[in-house]
Image (cartoon, rainbow, N blue to C red):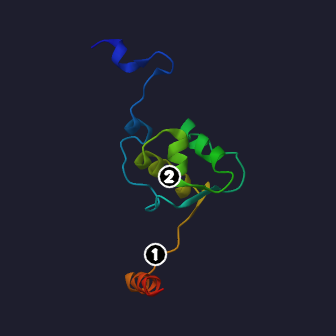
Amino acid sequence: MSDERWLDEDAGPIVPAYLLTKGRTVPASEAIDLIAVIITAGGLTPPVGLGPEHLIIMQKCTTPTRLVDVAAELGLPIGVVRVLVGDLHAQQLVQVEHPPPAPDASVLLEVINGLRAL
């Protein structure tokens, strides 16, 4: 196998995304919604042993940031970012604010019918 497959001229070695999560696909703490808001808890002094991606997430989330936006900014798959944020949340390094529950379908139908009546 040639080295060209695993190298990028500008970026250097390419690391498969699943290696960032050590093969895990489920967050350590809880399921995290795509539009959940992530906020760094406390300061930016993380414990030893975090990967560079964890540190980047903590830096990006000093202001409230949606999970999907973090994934887009990092250029990583959403599943990978969910696991990384879950790691940080389990260690209480970030807070995860879940979106409010969606309204009941009957409420939405009443709104649609009300708009049609106009």
Mark 1 or mark 2, which is nearer the start of the sequence? 2
- Looking at numbered disc 1 in the image, what kind of residue is underneath it? Ala
**Residue 48 vs residue 15: left or right?**
right
Which of the two residues, 99 or 31, is positioned nearer the viewer here? 99
Mark yes or no: residue 51 visible.
Answer: no
What is the x, y in percent for residue 12?
Answer: 48, 19
The quarter of the displayed image where residue 31 is located: bottom left
Residue 102: assigned label:
1
- Rounded to the nearest angstrom, the CA distance separating label 2 from label 1 is 18 Å
| Local secondary structure at mark 1 | loop
Q: Residue at x 44, y 87 (%)?
A: 117
Q: Is residue 107 above or below residue 44?
A: below
As drawn, the residue found furthest toward the front would be: 118
- Looking at numbered disc 2 in the image, what kind of residue is underneath it? Val
Q: Residue at x 70, y 46 (%)?
A: 44
| Local secondary structure at mark 2 | helix
Which of the two residues, 111 or 37, is positioned nearer the viewer here? 111
What is the x, y in percent for residue 112?
Answer: 42, 81
Which of the two residues, 102 or 41, is positioned nearer the viewer here? 102
What is the x, y in percent for residue 91?
Answer: 56, 55
Q: Which quadrant is home to the N terminus? A: top left
Q: Residue at x 50, y 21 (%)?
A: 11
Residue that numbered label 2 is attached to = 68
